[in-house]
Amino acid sequence: MSPFAVIAILCCLFYDIIPRAASIKFSIPISKADPTARHEEFRSLMIHTSARLMAERGTHLEPLTNMWNTLYFGEITIGTPPQPFNVIFDTGSSDLWVPSSRSSYCGSSVQNCYSSDQSTTYQMNGSPVTIQYGSGAMVGFLSEDTVTIGGNIVINNQLFGEAVTEQGTLNQPYDGILGLGYPGLSSYMTPPFFAAQAQGWFDRNVFSVLLTKGNNEGSKITFGGWDDSIITSEEMINWAPVTQQAYWKFSVESIFFGDMKFGSTEAIADTGTSLIIGPKSQVSQIVNYLGAVSISGFYAVPTSNVSSLPNFTFVIHGRMYTLPPEQYIVMTDGDYAVLGFGYIEDQSFWILGDVFLSNYYTIFSVEKEAVGFAPLPNNPEPLPEPSSSSIANFCSVFVVLPALYLRR
């Protein structure tokens, strides 16, 4: 045997005894919002609809903060030394932006502001940027710097927006937005997740989201895979193929609300939208069905009637995802119970925001070109879609609710 062959064998044996690096999970502290905050503060958070309608290779965890079950955000850093920011991890957009130290409101609000002159890795770009969201807009300019997620996912030379002017996001508990949509949804940059993948951070081009409720901590986003303590087998995941590589959009076979049925449509899984948002015509039918009234821009019904409200069911890739009323009521205020859904003018598809997503474990797979849904440990597994005759029987058990009236 030649010396080279001996060396090759020894190298292979040595490699086999080197301990393999396990997938690493990164966590940050989780804070909670004051549950006694004023209704208008709650309202300003709920209307954030961010879908643009108008380290080591392995698995990485980014804990998220839960704001009253309708808004979730976590921490990133930008620059060297790192400057921290709380951002919404938003699957309904694809851009990253944070407040700029050049903005007039920097220092006058609770937000953190990015200072390029404090970073040794900053690179000037300066191109103007305007990003429109459903409930606000950001106007500023592009910069380039090192972005770190979860303390260990270091993305070099990441383009991002420095916000000089913001509408609809001031005085919020978050600083900016980190978009997790497809690159095709951005006109300015490669989204950070896709940039991190290109720089070799993940074994799998996948991320997943767990949104906890109430006082339960543990909301997190997992980059490079999913939480094996929740997903013990990939067979648990129901994969809905993506129909458009911009939003995470997929087909919905049908929607039930009580004895009403809506036919096939599309929906997007959007962690940056608080509520469930649908086409005006369909949501109006539901609202009229309930006799709900508009209070401060939201639909509400008497608190005493919540237990008798019907289920809200979405049939996705052959499975029924059913929300009982306690899961789509987002707030009770004395005699009123606020419904966790609404509509946007001239919209043809549904947005499944945090009110829906907090009931399931959601996986976003670039490699499968699909959105996956899996049951959470304390939630029942979604049922298979029933046959047509079963649907008729299913709907017949519901009684149309009488009109409900509220006093202002």
Image: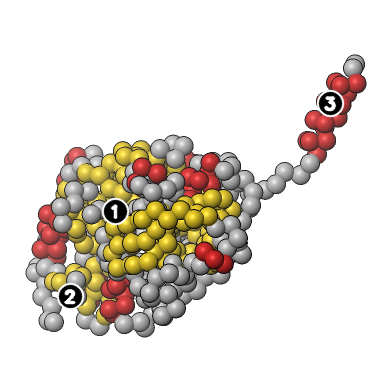
Q: CA distance from mark 1 to mark 3?
A: 56 Å
- What residue do we see at 34% from left, 67% from top? 165
* Front label number (2 vs 1): 1
**Of pointers 2 and 1, the one earlier in the residue sequence:** 1
Q: CA distance from mark 2 to mark 1?
A: 25 Å
Quadrant where the C terminus is found in the figure = bottom left
**Mark 3 closeness class: few <14, some 14–19, many ≥20 residues within 10 Å:** few
Q: 155 or 283: which is nearer to us? A: 155
Q: Which label sits on residue 295?
A: 2
| Left or right placement of residue 18 versus residue 127 in this view | right
**Of pointers 2 and 3, the one earlier in the residue sequence:** 3
Identify the element where label 2 is drawn.
Answer: strand
> What x and y, as percent, mark residue 47?
27, 67
- What residue do we see at 53% from left, 47% from top? 196
Quadrant of the rendered structure where residue 90 is? bottom left
> What x and y, as percent, mark residue 298?
20, 70
Residue position for label 3? 9
Q: 162 or 292: which is nearer to us? A: 162
